[in-house]
């Protein structure tokens, strides 16, 4: 069986900075993907670029509240233009591609998650390149994946990929902003190494991600046993170069792979910008007694989330656990710091007396 590798490319890797699809960039990317296929890999592409491909067709609004609809409309125009460019390039190699558009909801609901997994499996078995993107036209804050680095993580977990390659402008992780002359690139980092203190450059002008989102992706995947490689697309043969370890940074996956599908699923679908902060007593109860998280132990609620989303549990700015929330963010804010008996007085037909049940909670080491 071919080695599955997920490749995520940002907007600037496939479009022009001023807007519009770049056939030259896409041709180079597809040529590289074809080379990987010839070397025994089964590539799965996660591609940004829909919004930037279509934004020149839509007048940009002055009012900030209209920006979401502007981006959604731009994506509606840009996505087919992006796919046409991919399909035209793939045809040069007598290779077919398939479009898969998803939201965070598709990974949260088990049946839809399995549909994504099974669809990609069938495409790979039939030598068809899966091209995945977030469905920006229908996404909004509560259901959005957030960025395609996070989407690539979820696709890698869903498809049992052995590697994830994140192509970006910077050639990996540096000890400081790579634009500084004395910046040093890390060649390889073990999954246990802490790189939280590293400072890095901001995201690009047209992308939603940045090195910060890529490091969040690394932290989710490497403990599960998946290698992650971050490197630049601004060189010749960027993918083959990274596979052959001639650049970029390799984040080594845990040699003891995660065997629990549920635990690996919880680790990768967690929403990056949604969490609760707990007090000392709740943190100790979770760590020592493996109990459910009760509302009384919650001090603060951050971000927008729905019931059934996987959110983070933080204590002293560290992620203590992740788990499936029994309340949406508004309800959680109502019940935080309250005893279980008080919940029914605050929320009619409350779904639960606990914030996160212990069966749906994964403690982070």
Image (cartoon, grey):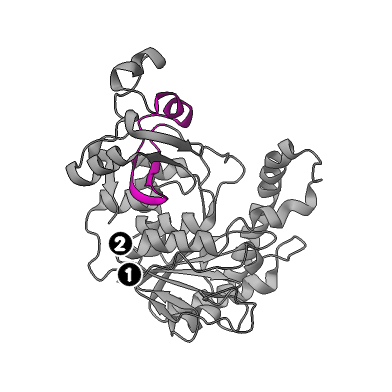
Vertical relation: 272 (above or below) 291:
below
Rendered residue at 70%/68% (across/down): 22
Vertical relation: 340 (above or below) 363:
above
Q: Helix, strand, or loop for circle 1?
A: loop
Q: Which residue is mark 1?
A: 253
Q: Which residue is mark 2?
A: 224
The span from disc 1 to disc 2 (Cα, nearest Å) is 7 Å
Say if residue 48 shows up in the picture: yes
Vertical relation: 89 (above or below) 338:
below
Say if residue 116 shows up in the picture: no
The furthest residue to the left: 289
Rendered residue at 42%/76% (across/down): 250
Q: Residues at badges 1 and 2 in contact (C-beta under 8 Å)?
A: yes
Q: In this orientation, which residue lies closer to the viewer: 147 or 291?
A: 291
Q: Which residues are magenta?
A: 307-336
Rendered residue at 61%/55% (across/down): 208
- The picture places residue 40, in percent across and down from the top left corner, at 38, 78
Q: In the visual, does 324 lie left or right of 230?
A: left
Considering the image in quadrants, where does the C terminus appear? Answer: bottom left
Is 321 part of what is drawn in magenta? yes
The furthest residue to the front: 280
Residue 156, disc: none
Q: In the visual, does 256 lie left or right of 14?
A: left
Q: In this orientation, which residue lies closer to the viewer: 282 or 69?
A: 282
Considering the image in quadrants, where does the N terminus appear? Answer: bottom left
Q: In the visual, does 342 lie left or right of 195?
A: left
Say whether disc 1 or disc 2 marks the residue closer to the N-terminus: 2
Is 311 part of what is drawn in magenta? yes
Vertical relation: 294 (above or below) 258:
above
């Amino acid at each position: 069986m071919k080695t599955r590798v997920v490749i995520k490319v940002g907007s600037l890797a496939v479009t022009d900075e001023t807007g519009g699809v770049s056939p030259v960039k896409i041709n180079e990317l597809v040529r590289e993907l074809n080379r990987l296929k010839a070397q025994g890999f089964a590539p799965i592409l996660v591609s940004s670029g829909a919004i930037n491909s279509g934004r020149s067709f839509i007048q940009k609004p002055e009012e900030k509240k209209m920006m979401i609809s502007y981006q959604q409309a731009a994506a509606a125009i840009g996505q087919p233009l992006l796919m046409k460019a991919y399909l035209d390039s793939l045809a040069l190699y007598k290779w077919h591609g398939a479009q898969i558009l998803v939201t965070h909801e598709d990974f949260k609901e088990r049946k839809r998650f399995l549909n994504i997994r099974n669809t990609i499996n069938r495409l790979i078995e039939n030598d068809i390149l899966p091209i995945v993107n977030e469905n920006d036209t229908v996404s909004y804050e509560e259901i959005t994946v957030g960025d395609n680095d996070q989407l690539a993580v979820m696709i890698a977990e869903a498809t049992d990929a052995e590697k994830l390659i994140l192509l970006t402008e910077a050639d990996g992780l540096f000890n400081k902003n790579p634009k500084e002359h004395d910046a040093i690139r890390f060649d390889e980092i073990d999954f246990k190494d802490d790189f939280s203190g590293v400072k890095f450059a901001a995201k690009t002008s047209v992308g939603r991600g940045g090195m910060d989102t890529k490091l969040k992706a690394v932290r989710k995947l490497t403990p599960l046993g998946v290698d992650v490689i971050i490197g630049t697309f601004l060189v010749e043969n960027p993918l083959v170069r990274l596979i052959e370890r001639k650049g970029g940074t390799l984040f080594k996956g845990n040699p003891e792979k995660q065997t629990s599908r549920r635990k690996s699923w919880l680790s990768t679908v967690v929403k990056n910008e949604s969490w609760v902060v707990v007090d000392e007593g709740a943190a100790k109860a979770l760590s020592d007694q493996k109990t459910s998280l009760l509302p009384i132990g919650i001090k603060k609620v951050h971000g927008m989330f729905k019931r059934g989303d996987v959110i983070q549990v933080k204590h002293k700015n560290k992620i203590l656990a992740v788990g499936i929330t029994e309340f949406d963010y508004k309800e959680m804010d109502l019940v935080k710091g309250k005893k279980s008996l008080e919940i029914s007085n605050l929320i009619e037909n409350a779904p639960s007396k606990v914030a996160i049940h212990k069966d749906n909670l994964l403690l982070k080491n």
